[in-house]
Image (cartoon, rainbow, N blue to C red):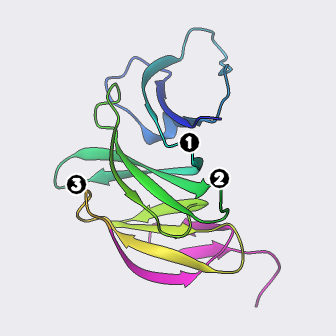
């Protein structure tokens, strides 16, 4: 199955909100409450060897550019993976600007100019990637992995793991 990123809009607004960015994983029909209200704005094919798993947005304040951070896992070596940075400022022309094999990409989140990734398991490591140079991201750290992560407005990151730990 071929992974395709599709940018869609349910409005006539001239800008893209990351909340309406979707990943198409082979689904042919997109259900809508009002048929015809969804418009395909653009798409970008990803390599066949990866499966998109998560999606987050990043706004680069110094340039005004908008990016999609697409977490992926390897189809050949799960849970290995990483993420792809896709420039979506012009939604009719999404452009892949970088790919980072961070070792994990099951869940991705952005805080300031850093991407945090986890592998979806409670073993292994999560990765911290500096994207301040968007075309040359650098892995700068790691932390215990988890199934999911959440970063609050105050910058605290919460790891979702099985079981209760006090």
Q: Residues within 10 Å of mark 1 (few under 14, many from 20)?
A: few
Asked if one can make out residue 93 in the rendered structure from this viewpoint, the answer is yes
Which contiguous range is marked in magenta?
A: 138-166
Residue at x 70% of width, y 80% of height: 123
Q: Residues within 10 Å of mark 3 (few under 14, many from 20)?
A: few
Asked if one can make out residue 156 in the rendered structure from this viewpoint, the answer is no
Q: Is residue 118 left or right of residue 39?
A: right
Q: Which mark is residue 61?
A: 3
Q: Which mark is residue 57?
A: none
Residue placed under numbered mark 1 in the picture: 48
Residue 158 part of the magenta-drawn span? yes
Element under disc 3? loop
Q: CA distance from mark 1 to mark 2?
A: 8 Å
Q: Are marks 3 and 2 in contact (CB under 8 Å)?
A: no
In front of the other: label 3 or label 1?
Answer: 1
Q: Residues within 10 Å of mark 2 (few under 14, many from 20)?
A: some
Residue placed under numbered mark 2 in the picture: 75
Q: Are marks 3 and 1 in contact (CB under 8 Å)?
A: no
Of residue 14 and residue 94, the one placed in the foreground of this image is 94
- In this figure, what is the number of numbered marks? 3
Q: In the picture shown, does residue 127 fall above or below 79?
A: below
| Residue 158 in the image, given as x and y percentages of width and height | 59, 75
Element under disc 1? loop
Residue at x 44% of width, y 41% of height: 18
Of residue 51 and residue 54, the one placed in the foreground of this image is 51
């Amino acid at each position: 199955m071929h992974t395709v990123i599709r940018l869609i809009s349910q409005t006539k607004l001239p800008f893209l909100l990351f909340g309406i960015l979707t990943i198409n994983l082979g689904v042919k029909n997109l259900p809508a409450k009002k048929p015809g209200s969804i418009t395909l704005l653009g798409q970008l094919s990803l390599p066949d060897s990866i499966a998109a798993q998560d999606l987050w947005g990043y706004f680069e304040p110094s340039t005004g550019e908008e990016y999609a951070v697409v977490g992926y896992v390897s189809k050949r070596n799960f849970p290995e993976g990483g993420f792809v940075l896709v420039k979506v400022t012009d939604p009719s022309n999404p452009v892949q600007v970088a790919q980072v094999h961070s070792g994990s990409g099951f869940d991705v989140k952005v805080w300031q100019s850093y991407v945090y990734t986890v592998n979806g398991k409670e073993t292994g490591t999560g990765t911290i990637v500096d994207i301040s140079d968007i075309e040359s991201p650098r892995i700068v750290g790691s932390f215990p992995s988890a199934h999911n992560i959440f970063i609050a407005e105050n910058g605290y990151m919460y790891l979702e793991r099985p079981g209760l730990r006090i």
